[in-house]
Image: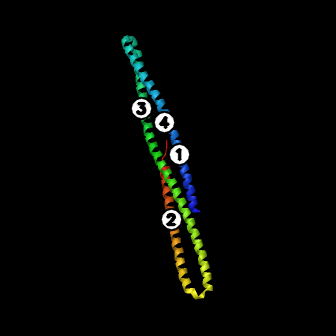
Amino acid sequence: MVVQEATDSLSKLAQQVDGMTQSIGTMSQDFEKIDAVLRVIDEIAEQTNLLALNAAIEAARAGEQGRGFAVVAGKVRALAARTQQSTSEVDRMLSDLRSATRVVVSSMDSTQKSCSKTVDTTSRVMSSLENMTSSITRINDLTTEIAFSAKEQSLITEDVNINMIEIHEMIRQLSSNAVDTVKSTQRLIQANVQLNDVVGGFKLS
């Protein structure tokens, strides 16, 4: 049945979103580890910069003999400064990535909740359709019995015909309601498919 297939698809979608959310959670832990490494590198660069500064001061005190060492100390300081700048840039990039990740997680959480809600609604619609089908079958059975009785009771043929018209109208209305319900379900499924496409559009680095 189409409705059952749609329900199964939405359930699988919810499971996939949950798996992606867990993966992003793991990635967030990796961000924290990278942050820790960056802090260590930044501390080393800062200490290197201080040591190079002290070395340059000592080289200046040594005069002509310390000139070569002063040049080396200057290059070490420049390297330490570039290292600190690089770690700052990486930290900024990680911060931006964390922000984007939070947006994606929020979006996937909303999608998962929407899918769960749709699965519940679709299940109720399917139950209603089954009840409608049962009612229509019962009405058809009653119609057959009434038609059979009409043949045997020619004296009340006119009254039976009137009842038949009313019963057929009930069948038509129930069928129309069933069609409307199916269309509504299809629109709901389409909306969730589009929402899944939006979530799938995010590319995680």
Q: Reply above or below: 39 against 197.
A: above
Q: Earlier in the sequence, mark 1 or mark 3?
A: 1
Q: Nearer the viewer, mark 4 or mark 3?
A: 4
Could you say which disc has been placed on residue 183 in the image? 2
Q: Earlier in the sequence, mark 4 or mark 3?
A: 4
User: Which residue is at 53% across, 80% downward?
Assistant: 165
Residue type of the residue flagged with mark 4: Phe
User: Which residue is at 41% across, 30% downward?
Assistant: 85
Using the numbered discs, state the Cα–Cα distance from disc 1 to disc 3 in whole angstroms.
29 Å
What element does badge 1 sit on? helix
| Colour approach in the figure | rainbow
Q: Which of 20 and 60 is in front in this view?
A: 20
Q: Residues within 10 Å of mark 1 (few under 14, many from 20)?
A: some
User: Which residue is at 59% across, 62% downward?
Assistant: 1
What element does badge 2 sit on? helix
What element does badge 3 sit on? helix
Could you say which disc has been placed on residue 5 in the image? none
Could you say which disc has been placed on residue 88 in the image? 3
Which residue matches tag 1?
20
Regarding residue 201, the answer to whether it shows in the image is no
Q: Which of marks 2 and 3 is nearer the N terminus?
A: 3
User: Which residue is at 42% across, 28% downward?
Assistant: 84
Q: Position of residue 63 (x, y in %)?
A: 36, 11
Q: Which of marks 4 and 2 is in front?
A: 2
Using the numbered discs, state the Cα–Cα distance from disc 4 to disc 2 in whole angstroms.
46 Å
Residue type of the residue flagged with mark 2: Lys
Q: Residues within 10 Å of mark 3 (few under 14, many from 20)?
A: some
Q: Nearer the viewer, residue 43 or 129?
A: 129
Which residue matches tag 4?
31
Residue 69: quadrant of the picture: top left
Q: Where is residue 143 in the image (x, y as percent from the top left)?
A: 59, 78
